Image: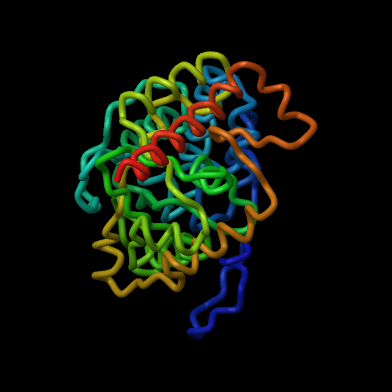
């Protein structure tokens, strides 16, 4: 994000003077933001390994407290615009869900995963937005890709097979981190406030994704997939709660309606984003969102075997159906 704002502007618009801050500390938080006209706050850093290694209660409390400090400091130093980067995951993912517009309702979730964290922090932002100043924009991107991006979605494509729910068509939409940065800049330059979804213009069908990735589907009944995910999360194999499996098997495509109406366009297509995702994950293997290798595969124990058995059983069932046909 900082690199994007620091680049020479190809349109001749004034360049930004950028200061990147890892954390705003509790003591004198406004000091680090002194002189800032625009503050961009990312609610998550797309580092799944770091995220899943922190106890949920402490992580959420720390995220809420940090957001409160940043927003209060931005107001104290007289910043004119605050851009908060969240995720379109706060709108949920369900079978047959239509394209999500900017004003789509937020779901209610009280789980221990990323979505619960984002909703808790967005509640803080919503209260802050009631004041007239500064201007506040909340960006809710589709599935992120880019250098260093590590999420449950990117790990889904590191698995030997792509999990799918029987009877559901899961279309795929991505967004490159550079396009999220360009959307943030566009919102600031055009004074866009409120919630804005951000995604590539195109959407990929399951067949297109399988062809590009070279991965085949494993189709399971929804009740089987989610019940198994719940058991595996309970024993510590699945890093995210079972509810977040929905984001890998159900659609959550966004319209980016207000951004596009104001002249913004994504530079990266979903097809190009998928290529980036696949290149970044090349050589890695993830089972149920957990990366494994030859040395630590045994550490998965019985639960890891359950994941392998689940996939193998599904393949056998599909093979039997084909033979009968």
Front residue of this view, candidates 284 and 90: 284
Q: Quadrant of residue 87?
A: top left
The residue at the far front in this view is: 324
Horizontal side of 210 relative to 166 (left or right) equals right
The residue at the far right in this view is: 295
Front residue of this view, candidates 263 and 234: 234
Front residue of this view, candidates 133 and 143: 143
* Rendered view: 307 above or below 83: above
> Residue at 49% across / 57% down in the picture?
38
Horizontal side of 183 relative to 155 (left or right) equals left
Query: Which part of the image, by quadrant, shows the N terminus?
Result: bottom right
Q: Position of residue 83 (x, y in %)?
A: 43, 52
Task: Report the coloring of the rendering.
Answer: rainbow
* Rendered view: 318 above or below 136: above
Q: Position of residue 104 (x, y in %)?
A: 21, 45
> Residue at 73% across / 37% down in the picture?
293
> Residue at 29% across / 38% down in the picture?
166
Q: Position of residue 319 (x, y in %)?
A: 42, 41
Q: Position of residue 27 (x, y in %)?
A: 64, 29
Tally the marks: 0
């Amino acid at each position: 994000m900082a690199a994007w704002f620091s680049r020479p502007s190809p349109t001749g618009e004034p360049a930004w003077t950028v200061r990147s801050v890892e954390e705003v500390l509790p003591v004198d938080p406004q000091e680090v933001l002194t002189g800032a006209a625009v503050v961009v706050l990312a609610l998550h850093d797309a580092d799944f390994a770091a995220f899943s290694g922190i106890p949920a209660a402490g992580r959420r409390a720390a995220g809420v407290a940090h957001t409160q400090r940043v927003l209060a400091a931005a107001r104290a130093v007289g910043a004119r615009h605050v851009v908060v980067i969240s995720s379109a995951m706060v709108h949920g993912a369900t079978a047959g869900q239509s394209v999500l517009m900017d004003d789509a309702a937020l779901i209610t979730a009280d789980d221990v995963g990323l979505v619960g964290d984002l909703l808790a922090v967005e509640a803080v932002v919503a209260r802050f937005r009631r004041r007239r100043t500064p201007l506040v924009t909340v960006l809710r991107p589709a599935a992120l890709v880019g250098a260093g991006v590590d999420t449950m979605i990117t790990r889904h494509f590191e698995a030997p097979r792509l999990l799918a729910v029987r009877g559901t068509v899961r279309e795929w939409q991505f967004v490159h981190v550079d396009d999220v940065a360009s959307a943030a800049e566009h919102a600031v330059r055009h004074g866009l406030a409120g919630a804005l979804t951000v995604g590539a213009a195109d959407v990929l069908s399951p067949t297109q994704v399988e062809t590009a990735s070279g991965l085949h589907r494993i189709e399971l009944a929804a009740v089987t997939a989610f019940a198994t995910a719940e058991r595996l999360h309970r024993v510590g194999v699945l890093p995210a709660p079972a509810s977040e499996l929905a984001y890998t098997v159900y659609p959550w495509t966004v319209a980016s309606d207000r951004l596009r109406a104001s002249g913004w366009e994504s530079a990266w297509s979903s097809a190009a984003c998928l290529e980036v995702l696949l290149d970044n994950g090349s050589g890695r293997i993830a089972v149920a969102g957990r990366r494994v290798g030859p040395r630590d595969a045994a550490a998965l124990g019985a639960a890891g075997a359950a994941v392998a058995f689940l996939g193998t059983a599904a393949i056998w069932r599909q093979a039997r159906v084909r033979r009968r046909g």
